[in-house]
Image (cartoon, rainbow, N blue to C red):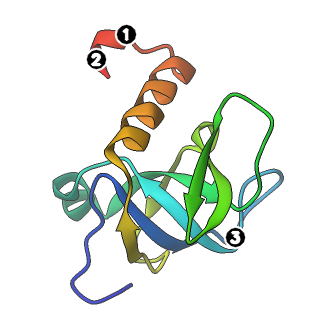
Amino acid sequence: MVAGYVPDTGDIAWLDFDPQAGREQGRRRPALVLTDQNYNRASGLMIVCPLTSKRKPYPFALPVVLDKVEGAVLVDHLKSLDWEVRNASFHSKADPALLSKVRTYVAVLLHLPRGRV
């Protein structure tokens, strides 16, 4: 973890996803932070969607370009992680339109009322 860094909503943060099991994403990789800094600081946890450098042909993999590499936000791989233990470091801020789209897809995935997104 970078000293003083507390992840915030819309951050693209690098995290250690190991250990992983089965089809879970592993290794050090970027993730989109969905929870706000107040929650993250108070709980020591954050909820993220990992990013992959591969395009995935299914609806819950939203296309994204990070550092000129085409990939996807894996909306259906939501994770709650300890950001200090996972060595979170700030990379960049996500485009607000991408964050909005990810939130909409999370709501669809979890069958949440659309007015609550």
Whether residue 80 sits left or right of residue 2 in the image: it is right
- Depth check, front residue: 98 or 14: 98
Q: Is residue 50 above or below residue 107?
A: below
Q: Mark 2 sits on what residue?
A: 116
Residue type at numbered disc 2: Arg
Q: Residues within 10 Å of mark 1 (few under 14, many from 20)?
A: few
Q: Residue at x 30, y 66 (%)?
A: 7
Cα separation, mark 3 vs mark 1, equals 33 Å
- Percent position of residue 3, x then y: 27, 89
Q: Closer to the observer: label 3 or label 1?
A: 1
Q: Is residue 61 above or below residue 20?
A: above
Percent from the top left, x then y, of residue 12?
42, 63
Q: Amino acid at mark 3?
A: Pro
Q: Secondary structure at mark 3?
A: loop
What residue sits right under mark 3 in the picture?
A: 19
Compare residues 115 and 94 and report the one nearer the observer: 94
Q: Residue at x 71, y 66 (%)?
A: 26
Please report whichever mark, 3 or 2, sits nearer to the chain's N-terminal start: 3
Q: Label 2's element?
A: helix
Q: Along the polypeptide, which appears first: circle 3 or circle 1?
A: 3
Q: Position of residue 54 (x, y in %)?
A: 77, 56
The quarter of the displayed image where residue 27 is located: bottom right
Q: Quadrant of the N terminus?
A: bottom left
Picture disc at residue 113: 1
Residue at left 40%, top 69%? Answer: 83
Question: For the residues marked 3 and 2, what is the alpha-carbon distance in whole angstroms?
Answer: 33 Å
Q: Residue furthest bottom?
A: 3
Q: Are marks 2 and 1 in contact (CB under 8 Å)?
A: yes
Q: Amino acid at mark 1?
A: Pro
